[in-house]
Structure formats: structure tokens, C-alpha cells
Amino acid sequence: MSLYLLDQDLRPVRRNAAARHADSPPGTSPGPGPVSSPGTAGPGPGPVSSPGPGTSPGAAGRRVGDLAPGFDDTELQALARQALHDGEWIREHLVRVRTPGEPGRDTVDAVTFFPIDSATGHRYLVATVEDVTERQAAHERLDILHTAHRQLGASLDAIGSAQELADVAVPRLADIATVDLLDEPLRGLPPRTGPVDPTAPLRRAAYRATHGSGRSPLEQGPIPHGELSTYGAPTPYSQVLDDGRARLVRGLNGDENWLTADPVRGRRLAGLGVHSMIVAPLVAHDTVLGLLALYRTRRPDPFEQADLDLAADLAARGALSIDKARSYARERTIATTLQRQLLPREPAELSAVETAQVYLPGAIGPGGDWYDVIPLSAARVGLAIGSITGSGIEAAALMGQLRTALRTLAVQDLAPDELLVRLDEVARVLTDEQRGSLPTGADRLPDGLASCLYLVYDPISRTCTAASAGHPSPVLIGPDGGPLPFELAPAPPLGWGDCCYETTTAELDEGCVLALYTEGLMSGRARHTGENGRPAEDVGTRRAVLERTLAQANEEQLPDLCDQVVYALLPERQREDAVLLLARTRALPDERVAVWTLPDDPAVVRTARRLAEHQLAAWELEGLEFTTELIVSELVTNAIRYGEPPIRLRMIHDQGLICEVSDNSASSPHMRRAKSTDEGGRGLFIIGHLAQRWGTRSGRHGKTIWAQQDLSSTGVPDLEIGGLDDLGGLDDPGGLGGSDT
């Protein structure tokens, strides 16, 4: 450390042996005069003895700027006068100077000024100059590592993490930084362990230079962003890929032997003016993910061993960040694949509605949103949509379980409110059974496990009945494009427990459009503008934007309309899952439905068969006459024996032939396999063999047993049922066949 004593004119009058310019002018004493240490470390220092006249050492006559040669003399003088006149310390003011005789090397000095008073009352200024180049370099390296610790890992994207690494390195450590990655991390695939083949292609993931970030096409460097390239061998790059050890190259002048193995890259380095470089591997869990290359072109001082250690630390931290992004991408890919596999395929063509849907996974991963289109009895259709709390693989698995449970309950022809009550019980069981593997926070949130909206549309009566468990109400657009009210009663979501759900029923005209959506569709910044040109959020809600977009329903196909909604509501990538299900209602013509009310008389069974026969002839379905008469006979017989009047027979000519018999009894029949010695119990068993589907539907007043046949099924079926001769069947004088209770 150099120590100086400055007078009122800021000229050195004393110095220690280590002071700069220690050579004294001729005729002066080489040693410093006696200087006592200050009494206190702060304002008001203690007195010192005044240097006598004629005893100034050789430092006298020099300027204060000479304390740190190469630095601005004006700034040092200003600092010194401030300390002298204010009586306060100036502590370790850092001065970066160019070393004399070494134009390629800078040094950092810490200059300190503090005043002292002599015994005679004269004020002097003590100045210390300490070379802190190494200390400051170490501090800057630690600060770079701190910045890396704070910034790396902020992105769950491998490309974003690579760019963060390059941004940390430039300009504080290097003038140019590049990050090249193997393709496996970028695609979310598990990387290969062990040495990497030097000829393996690497993709340019990030570039940063002191004159640009590499994010625009004009700043992408010699290799465009995203382009694959290979390194020649043997070169520092290939050696790093092979053994995973960082390399430092000093004094690059263009005639190195390894440049001949990769002449194209060598010419690029020469064109950029690279004189020093570091190549460090990106290694995570003993697996090489890629390379970090640092270059110096503008800074004259080359990289040192300490810089190599720092680069290795940065590469290790960056590799962990990239590997975390790779793991997230892999998990997201698995979860998204599972989610899509658990969602319904393209629904079959239905006579009740025309449907179209869009599912968009969120940027943070699939969140368990789902939808379903379920064909029901009597040509009706069930539409369902819901959202699981949480995200990831666990949410997708829970979504699959809830959707399966909902579909199982729906085909039992339950009313929407009753279905949600039972689905709520399923959600509570799932919560208890899988509490340890629920999505993060799902077992603590007060808003339940999932939301769900379920509605049933009947194309014969053109009625829509819906109930919601914590899900937004659907948007209803009339045939003329105007919005119609269809607000559902609010209710807790599934998993809340002990809930009652209320249904809402509306009569819809043919051509109405129902829009069922999840909240993710409303999470973006809507691009749609109002009449005054202001953003849609200023003139209404995003729901209003959805209504305005759906107003074109009569002019657009539903798949195109789904795209228009996405364009209007989600101009940017949304964080959460988004699902939109559109359904355009249809009406079944009256001539496709035939209804008869029958008396409670066993003799009416024969009449019911004849009515069915005549109706089949009117619909030109004579090929189904035998099976239809047998089905009608069995259903009417069961209603007469075990039901309560009135009894109603209905036939529906849809995509299949549907036969229904209704009565006022609440008891439902159950199919069983009768023994060969039983006199009855084969009726529903026969129907199960003759019909494509059959089931029981409960209503407010009684029940309905229905059976649906495939229109392509014609002729007499081959029935091998023990004891069939004992049934009576079609030739029974009373018209009664076997029956079930």
C-alpha cells in the first residue's frame, strides 16, 4: 500500500517506501519524515507534527493525480479537496487505470483520503493507494455468479434458459457468448449419458454479443438461431464434448493446428477478431447437454485461469437450468399426450346437434380441462365440460377418472342435477384416495377438486336442461345471431360435499348455438375491439366478445367459428388450459316420431304389435318388423304386468330405430339369466340380444324402458335361449310373453 501526506495545495510532502515514484529528486532525503497515525478513524483526526521547512522528501512537487497514474487528475483533485475542506473520509474510491507499459492490462486502485491536523494547526491530507485488482476481479466474479443464481432458471424453456446464460456472461465476462445444445434436451427427450460423439449435430440455442442480443435476425451471429451445426475434430469443442472438461485458449492468432480440423469455424473466429476463448461443457447429472463458448474480441486482456473456473461454474448452473427446463418439457409432453388420449375422439354424427371443439393446452402444462359429447336414449345428447384443479400428469389422470365416471352416469339417463350429486360423491372419494398424489394445492384449496357443467338436449321437444357445479354458464346464441339468456344457478364445485344442484330448462329453436367453455378461454387479452375502437375490456367483458364472435354462427362452419373465437380471445399463448365446445341444435321432424297411449289391458299387446308394423311400413323399415314386434311385445307386456297406467308406446326413427314404453311405476326391471326350468324371466334377456342398446330412464312420473336397433339389421335373428318355447311370445292368444321384475 502506498501512503502519502498532502499539503493544502494537494502536493505530496511525505510518502512511505512502498509509494509510487519513490525515486527522489537530487538533493532530497530519500526517507519519509515522521508522520503520526491519526487519532480517530473519521472526522476530526488527531494532531500530527508539522514537517519542517527544507525536509520535504522527493515526492514533493508532484500532483495528486500522480497517485494513480493513468486516471483523470481532475476527479482525484475534486475528491481530495472535498476531504480536505469537509474534514470527512473518502474511503476506497475505486480507480480503474491503464498500466503504464502494458496497454493490454488494466489495474484497479482503491484511493482513500482523510484529513489530519498538525500540532501547529495546519491541516494535511493523508492519501492511501492500494492495488485491489485481484480483489476487485474476485468480487466481480462473485457478483456474476450471484447474478447467474438470481436470473438462471427463471424460464421453463430450454431456449430461454440458454439465452439467460448467454446474457449473464456478456458483457461482464466475455464479448461474445454462444450456447449450442443437443437436440434431445430441446425436444424434452432423455439425454444420452457418457461421452458425446464430436460429430453429433448441435443446435444454436443462444447468442449474445456486446453489440447485440442475437434475438433479432440481424444479431444472430455467424450461425443463425436454431440452425444445426457440427464441430470438427480434434478441436477444443470436440475435446470438451468427449471428456466434459472446460478448455481455455489464449493468444489465438490463426495459425493453431486445431483450426485446420475446422477451417470454416476458424475463419469465422478470425473475422470476429477473437484472441482468447473458453469452451465449457453444459453437464447436468453426468450428462453433457451442450456447449458454452465465450470469446473476447474487444477487451484486450485474455481470459485467465480464474475466468475459466468462473465459466465452468456458470456452465454448471446453466446446465441445471436447461435440464430443469428439459424435465419440465418432458413432463409436459407426457401430460399433454395423456390428456389428449383421455379426451374424446371425433364424436359420431348426431341428429340432435352439430358439434365442434378446440382444446388448447396451457403454457404451464395441461390443467385437466375436458369435454364430452354423449349420445343418450331417445335421440337426445349430453354435453359436458369441466376443469380439474391443478396441472400436470396428476391433473390429467384425475380428469380421465372423472370423465369416465361422468360418462358412466350419463348413459344411465340421469337428470343433470342428480348426475352432479353422484359425481360430487365420486370426486370426494378420489380426493380421499389420492390425496398424496393430487395436483399441488388441490387438497388445500377451498374451491373443490373440479368444476363441471352438464346439459341434456332433446331434439324432439327442443328443450335443454342444464346444471353447473362451479362452472361458468354456457353462452346461448339464437338463430338470428343474438344472445339469449341461459344463466345457471351458482353451486359449489365437485368435491365440496353434501351439495344440491339446481337445473335450468330452456326451449331452444332449431339453429341455436350453445358455447361451453373453461375459464382458460377467458384468461387472455382479447384482441376484439368495440364500436369506438377501444379494447374489448373497456366496453364489456370477454364473454361479450365471445357473444359477438358467435353472432356469425349462421355464416360460419362450427370448426371455423372455433378458430375465430380463439383468435378473438387468445391472441397470445394462454397460461391455463382452454376448451371451447360449440353445439348447433337440430330438431327431429314430427314425422319421425310416433306416439300411442295404450289401455291397461293384456289384449292391447297384439294391438301394439300391429301399430308398430304399420309404422315400420310407413318408414319403409319392413326388414325390422320381426325384431321390432318382439321388442314391443315384451316391453308392453312388462308395463302391463308390473307397471301402472297410463302406458305409452313411442317409436323414433333416428339414426337407429328406438322403441320406448313408459308407465307411471317407479320400479325398474333388471335383466337376469333364467334357468331352463324357469317359466319366466327371459323378456329383457331377449331384448338385450335383439337390440343394439337398451336401458331404463326414470322421470318425474314413472319410468321409460327403451331399446334401440341398428337400421342395417334386418331378418330374423338366431336366438338360442333355453326354454324359449315356454314364453308364449308372438302366438300367445293373450299376447303376453315372458316378463321380468
Image: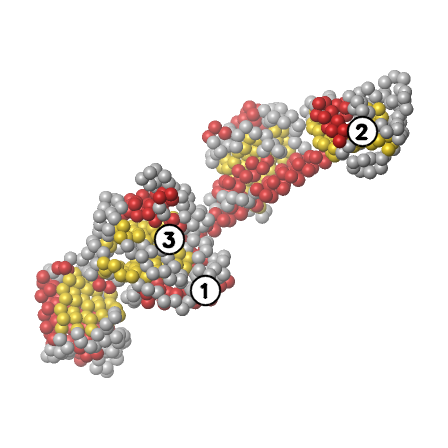
The colour mode here is secondary structure
Q: Amino acid at mark 3?
A: Thr
Determine whether the residue tagged by mark 2 lies in a helix, strand or loop. Answer: strand
Nearer-the-camera pick, 413 or 739: 413
Can you tell which of label 1 and label 3 is closer to the viewer? 3
The residue identified by callout 1 is 431
Q: CA distance from mark 2 to mark 3?
A: 74 Å
Give the residue drawn at x 50%, y 29%. 219
The residue identified by callout 3 is 518
Q: Is residue 515 above or below residue 9?
A: below
Find residue 268 and report its horizontal and vertical position in percent: 54, 26
Is 591 displayed left or right of 82 in the figure?
left
Q: Amino acid at mark 2?
A: Leu
Q: Which numbered circle lies on residue 531? A: none
Determine whether the residue tagged by mark 3 lies in a helix, strand or loop. Answer: loop
The residue identified by callout 2 is 125
Is 78 displayed left or right of 186 in the figure?
right
Find residue 31 and report its horizontal and vertical position in percent: 89, 25
Ranked by sequence position, the earlier of labels 2 and 3 is 2
Q: CA distance from mark 2 to mark 1?
A: 76 Å
